[in-house]
Amino acid sequence: MEENRMIQRSSLAKGYRPIAGTDDNIILYHEGTLYLANSEGKKIQKILSLSPKTWKDRLRITVRLFRREPKAAILVDHMLFIAQHRKINLIDLDTKLGSVIATSNEGFTDPLGFCCAQDADHIVLWGEYGSNEQRESVRIYGVTQDRMVEVIHTFPAGEIRHIHSIIPAHDGGYYIFTGDNEPHAGIYHADKLFHSVQPVAYSSQQYRAVVGFDTDEGLLYATDAVNEPNFVYCLKKNGELVKVCQLNGSCIYGTRCGTGFLFSTTVEPDERNRGPLSWISYKRGEGVLSSEVHLVHVDENMNSQIIARLKKDWLPMKLFQYESIQFASGSQQKVWMYPVAVSNNDACTYCFGHR
């Protein structure tokens, strides 16, 4: 990784993936087991094993091939929620006990992320994500305070393919990012209790996004348009759409960073390329301009800067995961970063220290 002075390589061994944290601790995942470390990534203690270690966990290439690592995680008080292998796990860090509270429906896989609930009745929310080839209805789930899972909203069949993310809004409600190419896919707004879910902007790849943040300037988000140019946009309160910067590829991962924001671009294949040979194709989507991942910082004044560049490794991207930088969730003094499918730095851990 081309480092600036704010990015440092962690002392953690390869494959210890940071998934969620606070200012004082970081939770790591390695070969089916969860660990707790301090904010320096040291004094590692085992929490519990999520699943027995298998041969698929022993080599990095099989970890990537079989998607062995968690897709998403969030820490709320002493409760850790993890999406992995089409299951939602809830781990109580006080008792070190875990349980499966939900499983994915047919046609869907793990959600791309969780959202802290803004109402008093729920803890976290997530939306269904997956191929959904039949374009069935798509649900948003919430976990209640007594740890029960319930459906809190359903998009009708054929309206959207899936949900990318749910973003807390300043008004106490939420923005919902949906995909991918359906006429009604785009950005929606929901009130706090999901009694009203209304489209904000849709029917354009300009509104196809996974990562976003509600700011004083407006809704800041990066596009996930595989076959069209990608940008970081700010959707103003008056509906004006402002380009903040162009990206060299689609964006799936991002995080807050002090008063600013980090976005990772992604190297992914042309989504129109289907069939068995697509799994070993090296053809990038038209909106993916290079085989580099860029780490882009956007400050509170909407100034942008590329602060790191990483080159893709030699393995086919669809079969062995898209090249990207993934981030641990949570509020931390350091932003924990985990590059995937990059030359020399795959499964290494880096920290970005912000002022």
Image: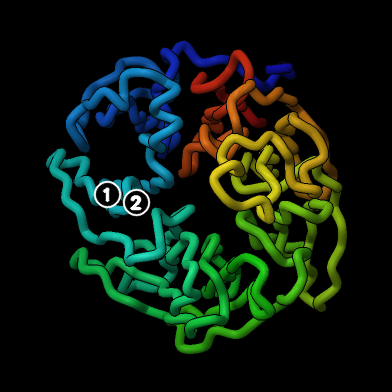
Q: Which of 226 and 236 is in front in this view?
A: 226
Q: Height in image: 21 above or below 227?
A: above
In terms of image quadrants, where is residue 211?
A: bottom right
Query: Disc 2 versus disc 1: distance between alpha carbons?
Result: 5 Å
**Marks 2,1: beta carbons within 8 A:** yes
Task: Identify the amino acid type marked 1.
Answer: Met
Residue drawn at point x = 40 percent, y = 64 percent:
107
Q: Height in image: 212 above or below 239?
A: above
Residue ID for mark 2 = 76
10 Å neighbourhood of mark 1: few (<14), some, or many (≥20)?
Answer: some
Quadrant into which the N terminus falls: top right
Residue ID for mark 1 = 79
Q: In the displayed structure, does residue 93 sit left or right of residue 130? A: left
Q: In the displayed structure, does residue 257 sit left or right of residue 71? A: right
Determine if residue 276 is in view: yes
Residue drawn at point x = 73 percent, y = 56 percent:
225
Q: Which of 275 and 23 is in front in this view?
A: 275
Task: Identify the amino acid type marked 2.
Answer: Val
Q: Nearer the viewer, residue 231 or 85?
A: 85
Relative image position of residue 284 (x, y in whole percent): 73, 41
Quadrant into which the C terminus falls: top right
Label 1: element kind: strand
Residue furthest to the bottom: 195
In terms of image quadrants, where is residue 63?
A: top left
Relative image position of residue 298 (x, y in whole percent): 76, 43
